[in-house]
Amino acid sequence: NLLLTEALKQSDSQHRNDKLKVAAKLLQDSREHTFQVKAIDETQRLFRIQEVFEKDLGESFVGLSVNETIYKLIKSGNIKRSQKVQSEFKVAEKTYWWIRLRALISRRDWRELEEM
Amino acid sequence: MAPTATLDASDITEKARRDLLQLLEGVRGKKNLVIEKSLAGPVGLFVKFSTLQEYGVDKVFFLENNNVDSTQRNVIFLARGEKARQVQAIAEQIKRVRRESKQDHEFSIFWVPRRTLVSDQILEETGVLGEVNVAEFQMYFVPLEKTVLSLEMDDAFSDIYLRRDPTAIFLAARALMLLQKSQGLFPRILGKGENAKSLANMLLHMRAEEDIDASSDPSNAHVHSFDLTPSATIDNLIIIDREVDFPTVLLTQLTYEGLIDETFGIQNNQTEVDSSITGAAPSQPPPQQTSGANSQAPAVQPPAPSALKRKILLDSTDKLYTQLRDANFAIVGTLLSRVARRLQSDYDSRHKANQSINELREFVNKLPSYQAEQASLKIHISLADELKKVTNGDLFLRVLEVQQNLAAGADPSTVHEIIEELIARDCSLTTVLRLLCLESCVSGGLRQRDLEHFKRQVLQGYGYQHLLTFAALEKIGLLIPRVSAGAGAYLNPLANPSGAATVTDYNLVRKSLKLFVDDVNESEPNDIAYVFSGYAPLSVRLVQCILQKPYLAQLTNPRTAPAANSQPSTATASGNWKGFEDVLARIKGPTVDEVQKGHNAAASQARKTLQGSGGGQVKTSIVFFLGGVTFAEIAALRYIDGQLGEKRRLIVATTSMIKGDTAVGAGMEGRSFKMR
């Protein structure tokens, strides 16, 4: 299964999703790899959501990690969307606040900070 | 070929230089030299560019993108013959040059350290084998210091543990074999760990091969048999497999040299530092800075990076650095200020009244050395300053807190929260992974639930490509789930007749070898634990098991110590694992203990008498770290060397220098899902 994951690195958007699916399918057969299956599943969801953001906001999101996505969203002022990502991927509350803190500081948005 | 009295690093340097220059001489006329990037540093350690020029080298290139110049008729490649990729690169370059230039070219390839079947095969396939002169440049050990030898194989760690590629071990065996040929057999080979075992076996095997060669060729026989008698100068060889002691690598080194390595990175005794830290490179660098520096740099490097980065040579030619390198960073500041004050007073002495002309002259004579010292002082102050900034940083302290807790054997779950916070704060992934790996190594794996929890956090924080990272780390054995079956094994060690535990039982080993010392004295070290401010590297403790038995016995068991001391202890002299078998059984991997005897007893007897009464002889122990050694461990070994006194010398040999980032980085997935 490593080979497959390796292969998906090179391919672009469309191919990648296909590869991920194949990988997930293969892994599903064995019981030990439930964690990997879940992770690959999440990867696919993340891509989908990032593609939506890209269309909506006209900025590039694909390739960022979950935390980075949230960071970028808050930084550009899309708190609502960031919260959606948080709930979607079950990011821990504490983690979320750290990210939010960093993002707001980098934006120099002191007003928002105070409200926190 | 009479064995020299003591093993001397400069001999090795000298030999390597002679060999290379001889090879260069063999090629007539002017030539361009193409060097593999990872070899440039080591080669630069013993040959200067000006010397190369004397031997007709016109330009030096790195072997990378198609940059080989066709200005000279002769083109020489200098590369490692182990990696197929390099060989292919060379073949391609040759083809390209031949295609593009109108001139006739003559190509030579010097393989370091040996010509391999693979390389020949590839050259043949690409159709260039017939047109190149192939030679070997046998460079094995590169001395970094008088007592530190290194093979300088940067990939050794990932090769051995991730890819299970024994090349590095084989080369290590060859290198040690060469040592044996010049110094005589190692009377005793001790070791710990799976790979240490295979290295020892390989050594025995190679020796057997030599014997057969010798007997089949009678004209040579007496030469060989003489060479292969036990050495009078080398007492034993201690092989430590890195696998035995991962935690030491994962901890942040706290010696001055170690910290420089952690923050800036040290390669081939040089570190590259942003010039804003040390101040712009002075127009006239102090003499000891340039003496060994990589003088090929101007020829091969584009000017842009060198303007921002400054290379600093760090080795024993810098007197000040020799004092500082092994000190715990906590006291580097005081040391520096002491030196500064002394320099000041030296300067002031000039103002002393009624000086005679002689005194004045003496002072003027000393001036250059003062200036040099001042310059190096300046550099080290600014370096220390920069390190101070790093070490006082919030993140660094957090990381250190976790490390110390884990090393001290605190309940790992207490540090989980901090690690989580670090992930959330987007601390560098290597740091996080180092901590996780450390926890896994110390406590025999993470609990399944915790492991998955952290995996999730990391995947979300740094991207899903790190699924592969985790797979790799698990393969290396750095980050593993705790196996319940394993727990049964070390509850009952007798169930494992081979005596080789699969996992190191850290809690037990920590106690019996006193790996964690609470009251360390950082300014005047009283135990090797000072290099990590409390944690004593397991690897070095193992060396102590062999060389400093009484000391360790006293340390680990203060109550029975007096009794042990009262009886005349002969164990120190014999130098074996005796007395520590139980502990060793709890550490991962098999234990090695081989005695090598000369098959010609008379010859060895004669040698002994030749060397005079063995009593006054300085005995040398070679400590070989398979898979890399950290600067902190070297510092600790130097400390032991000091403790052992005049009668014994320690020489550290290794495949490469290593630090935690390298170890973790070996498994890390570099690529990401970013679109290109």
Image: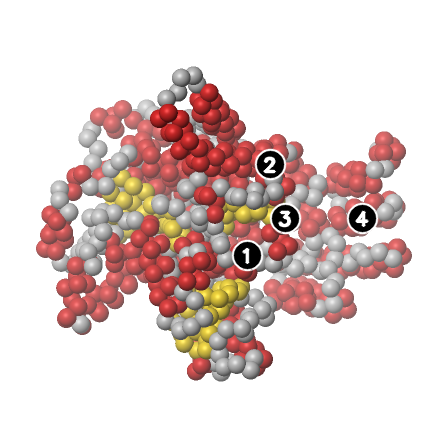
Question: Which residue is tagged 4?
Answer: A72
Identify the subunit bearing mark 1.
B
Question: Which residue is tagged 2?
Answer: B386
* Kind of residue sitting beneath label 1: Pro
For image coordinates 83% across by 45% down, the residue present is: A75
Nearer the observer, disc 2 or disc 1? 1
Few, some or many residues within 10 Å of mark 4 (<14, 14–19, 20+): many
- Using the numbered discs, state the Cα–Cα distance from disc 1 to disc 3 in whole angstroms: 14 Å
* Kind of residue sitting beneath label 2: Glu
- Using the numbered discs, state the Cα–Cα distance from disc 3 to disc 2 in whole angstroms: 16 Å
- Give the mark, 3 or 2, whose residue is nearer the N terminus: 3
Q: Position of residue B369 (x, y in %)?
A: 43, 35
- Using the numbered discs, state the Cα–Cα distance from disc 2 to disc 1 in whole angstroms: 27 Å
Question: Which residue is tagged 3?
Answer: B308
Question: Which residue is tagged 1?
Answer: B298
For image coordinates 65% across by 59% down, the residue present is: B671
At numbered mark 1, what does the secondary structure look like: helix, strand or loop? helix
For image coordinates 45% across by 43% down, the residue present is: B288
- Say whether marks 2 and 4 touch (CB < 8 Å): no
- Say whether marks 1 and 3 touch (CB < 8 Å): no
Identify whether B616 is placed above or below B71.
Answer: above
Q: Quadrant of the N terminus of chain B?
A: bottom left
